[in-house]
């Protein structure tokens, strides 16, 4: 499901206009992104938790040449599904 399909389905389920749903989804995504960039955790009870994880520096290989390369440490976003979401999917 892509964003347009999600907007269509939420609009169908709630009766709100697609434009309003799109603005709300954009606002939610912006708020989560901003919180994660500030190092904060975002927890949506029943759905899951978004947080930033630190990935350590490591050594890798260029698959074309086989040459060793250094991969720098970095922060990556991470999502852990909540119990309700896990149960619903199974």
Image: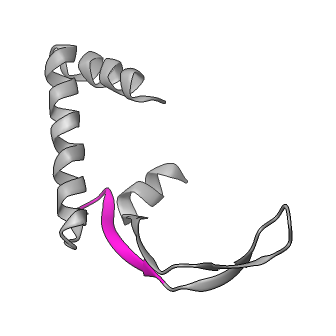
Q: Position of residue 89 (x, y in %)?
A: 51, 50
Q: Is residue 42 above or below residue 17?
A: below
Position of 58 compared to 11: left or right? right
Q: Position of residue 66 (x, y in %)?
A: 86, 72
Q: Is residue 49 magenta?
A: yes
Magenta segment's dominant SS is strand
Q: Position of residue 8 (x, y in %)?
A: 33, 18
Residue plotted at (86% across, 66% down): 65
Q: Is residue 54 magenta?
A: yes
Q: 40 or 9, which lies in front?
A: 40
Residue plotted at (81% across, 75% down): 67
- Total number of numbered discs in the rendering: 0
Residue plotted at (19% across, 46% down): 30
Q: Which region shows up in magenta? A: 45-55
Position of 50 compared to 64: left or right? left
Q: 84 or 32, which lies in front?
A: 32
Position of 31 compared to 75: left or right? left
């Amino acid at each position: 499901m892509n964003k347009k399909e999600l907007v269509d389905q939420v609009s169908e389920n709630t009766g709100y206009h697609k434009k309003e749903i799109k603005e709300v989804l954009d606002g939610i995504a912006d708020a989560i992104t901003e919180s994660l960039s500030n190092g904060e955790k975002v927890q949506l009870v029943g759905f899951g938790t978004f947080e930033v994880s630190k990935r350590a520096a490591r050594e890798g290989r260029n698959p074309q040449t086989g040459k060793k390369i250094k991969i720098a440490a970095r922060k990556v976003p991470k999502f852990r599904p909540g119990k309700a979401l896990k149960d619903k999917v199974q």
